[in-house]
Image: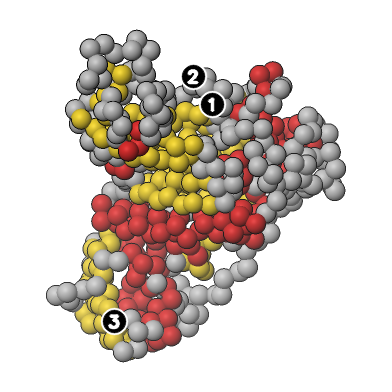
Amino acid sequence: MGARFPFPSFPRGWFVIGFPEDVAPGQVKTLRYFGQDIVVFRTESGVLSAVDKTCPHLGAHLGGGHVKGECLRCPFHDWGFRPDGVCVDVPYAPKIPPKAAVKTWHIREQNGVILAWYCPRGEAPTYEVPVLEEEGWTGNKTVRWVVRSHPQEVAENTVDCSHLGPVHHVGRTDVLSVEQEGHFMRVVLHMEASGAPIDMPDEFNDVELDVKLYGIGHIVSSTTVLTSDMRTRQRIYPTPIDEDTIAIFGVSNIKMMPDEDYTREIEDIFYKAFLVDFPKDFPIWENKAYLDKPMLAGGDGPIGRYRRWCRQFYDYPEAAAAQPTAAAAPAAAAPTTALAKLKGWLRTLAQAPAANSNGAGNNGHNNNDGGLDAHLIDLGPRKPRPAAAAVGKFASVGDYFETLERRFNPAAAGDLQAVIQWVLTGDKACAYFAEIKDGNVQRVAGTHPAPTITIEMSADDYLLMINGELNGARAFSTGRGRLRGPVRLAMKMQRLFPLDAAV
């Protein structure tokens, strides 16, 4: 490897080299990964193959060839190679040389990506990655970035708990569990996440983040927003291009909700948040030094443990003998709540050696798991969030609408031109719309022929929601309410019509 990273080779494992739609039937592409050219082609029947660039005949670059039927044809002498690399046609020769073949790569089309197995010694795959559940999830929204960094740095970011506040504006983060076995590592976190990335800067959500690593190049991050009962899944695939540059393939999905229109809008919001929030690390990665022996502190996260786990994927002399084993299970049955799980880990760690407060002996080469698990020390009780300004309670939805015009905030509206409509059902059924235009609002009883957004739910549930007794996002994600129109406008309503103390 280069001078910037002290690793003896590119890491072995499964890495993403593209998306299936990138290579159409009959197409040939040259991709640059692991410091070399990889020629990828798809036969006319749709079979995908990846081969080394060099034709075994006279060394032509096969990336300049073309597909004919089920073969890749060399641009120099038109030799034909099957997807398995075997030469099956030499147009001008009566007999094919018996060993004529081009080296192939182990590839998989799985989970909406193209996976290639890399091993510096050319050995066959030693593990597989799981097929992810697709039923009940939205389709893949994808992205590809190019960054000056290394795959190990990207995966390390998922266990670096203490960067989440300064870089991603996350509140307190607690490590609930860490486990590893062979090529697999899993870290479960509980955090207080700001709603800023999804246009709700005044909101904080309780979030559980379940990060699964299948080798260094395969990260599956499942997020459950406990506050609103939403589930999202982001996959991050860092792949080496050369010694100092990587491609990062990103895939985003969310769990389907009862309302398809609402699902599509929320999917778009989370995908755009992914595109904005994840790259905040890029300038840091591109300019940081990799410290082989970092000075870690309690609360950093399981960085040392992660780095020891990573060593198995390189050609270090001890790699074969240093395969990590599964973490010991807690003596008690696994707790069911996030807080209970955290307390269970803290009880276990109370019996472990104390972590050195200045980080000495807590680096990537320390073999003492007690010291490396300093991230699980008791950080004390959670500090209460700042108390929200006192707001009145509405006695009825009628009170809410009667005070709507008085509570309207022109500054929050800006240049917004919209019609917000409410259709409330049940014993206290009613319908209103508010037309916002030129910094003013007018409330009207009844329905509008062309509203910008319509909120539909029972009057009883709406009263609970405006009084803070029912989470709005949870109401819509579980089907207790329905939105017709832009979700981002619904998110803005609390600022448009603040619930002041004089209700």
Question: Is residue 76 visible in this depiction of the protein?
Answer: yes
Question: What residue is shown at x 55% (from left), y 42% (from top)?
Answer: 242
Query: Circle 2 sits in a helix, a strand or a loop, which is it?
Result: loop
What is the x, y in percent for residue 261? Answer: 25, 56
Do residues under tags 2 and 3 come within 8 Å of each other at their CB atoms?
no
Marks 2 and 1: in contact by CB < 8 Å? yes
Residue marked by disc 3: 417
What's the amino acid at mark 1?
Answer: Cys
Q: CA distance from mark 2 to mark 3?
A: 61 Å
Q: Nearer the viewer, residue 198 or 399?
A: 198
Badge 2 crowding class, 10 Å Cα cut-off, few under 14, some 14 to 19, many 20 or more, is few
Where residue 151 sits in the image (x, y, percent)?
57, 41
Nearest the viewer among 40 and 138 is 40
Where does label 1 land, which residue?
Answer: 119
Name the element at disc 3: loop
Q: Is residue 118 left or right of residue 347?
A: left
The residue lying at 29 percent from left, 86 percent from top is 437
Q: Residue 367 vs residue 49: left or right?
A: right
Residue type pointed to by label 3:
Gln
Residue furthest to the left in view is 449
Q: Earlier in the sequence, mark 3 or mark 1?
A: 1
Distance between the alpha carbons at the discs numbered 1 and 2: 8 Å
Residue 359 picture location, percent across and down: 82, 45
In 3D space, how far apart are the residues under numbered discs 3 and 1 (Cα atoms)? Answer: 58 Å
* Front tag of 2 and 3: 2
Name the residue carrying label 2: 124
Q: Earlier in the sequence, mark 2 or mark 3?
A: 2
Q: For the residue marked with disc 2, what is the amino acid?
A: Ala
Rendered location of residue 19, percent (x, y): 35, 41
Task: Count the numbered circles shown.
Answer: 3
Position of residue 22 relative to residue 76, above or below, is: below
SS at circle 1:
loop
